[in-house]
Image: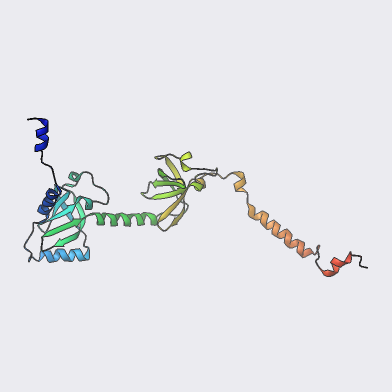
Amino acid sequence: MSEEMKIQETPVETMEDYAAELEASLKQGPPNDDPVWDKFETMLKEKTIFPVKIDSVVKAGVVAYVDEVRAFIPASKLAAGYVENLEEYKGQTVEVMVITADKENKKLVLSAKEVARQKEKEEKAARLAACEVGQVLEGTVDSLMDYGAFIDLDNGLSGLLHVSQISYKRVEKPSDVLKKGEKVQVKIIAVKDGKLSLSIKALQEAPARERKDRAPRESREDKEMFNYKETGKASTSLKDLLAGLDIK
């Protein structure tokens, strides 16, 4: 048999095949009048979170059982991010919530994505709460922009290192002095709206001209001006102004 004939005989998957397999993985369950479907509908409304064990892998997702009812978890709903290998989840227990409870068509669909993202959000909030201005952390340069660099910190958070906070020396572009993947030590200089502002400059010794304390000089100038007026060495009275004039 020629290679051309082999190619022609190879079945081609279509969207209909995909839909048929998806339906097959869903359309199994107890009768519509079984009270378990009322339970699923309640879980859907209340966004109940519960654990399930992944039983098997099918096209476009995985299968688990809830109260002996076959449930489908789409690949896009299995984790907070993209899942490359579904087989790795087989036998694992994940926390999910019901996103479809169709009694009439016996479709029970679950999602672990929303639960995982909610956990990530809570964990991030806890880590942010532990961050304080002045804290020094280790991190890795993740990306470089014209206005600064984003640093992935060892505590699992990310922060912005603005170009003005890289060095006391003038830096045109962060890429001139930093490289992606480079390890850096930074200081937290602000925590606002769930975001961290970082600085390398704050850990460096300021140049002599930057260390000059201008406040005392300004205070002396203020004091001298005050003393000047206080001693009355200069007068702006009309008498004083006319004293030296020879008016004829």
Vertical order, 15 against 245 (above or below): above
Vertical order, 122 against 172 (above or below): below
Q: Residue 18 in the image: x percent, y percent? A: 14, 49
Asked where in the image residue 236 lies, by quadrant, the reply is bottom right
Q: Residue furthest right?
A: 248
Residue 20 lies left or right of residue 205; in this view the side is left
- Residue at 13%, 42% in the rendered image: 12
Residue 140 lies left or right of residue 243; in this view the side is left
Front residue of 244 and 71: 244
Q: Residue 247 in the image: x percent, y percent? A: 91, 67
Residue 233 lies left or right of residue 137; in this view the side is right
Q: Residue furthest top?
A: 2
Front residue of 191 and 148: 148
Front residue of 9 and 51: 9
Please count the marks in the image: 0
Q: Residue 128 in the image: x percent, y percent? A: 39, 55
Q: Residue 82 in the image: x percent, y percent? A: 26, 48
Q: Is residue 231 visible?
A: yes
Q: Is residue 177 visible?
A: no
In the rendered view of the protein, which quadrant contains the N terminus?
Answer: top left
In the rendered view of the protein, which quadrant contains the C terminus?
Answer: bottom right
- Residue at 19%, 47% in the rendered image: 89
Front residue of 62 and 233: 62
Q: Residue furthest bottom?
A: 238
Residue 146 lies left or right of residue 15; in this view the side is right
The scheme the figure's colours follow is rainbow
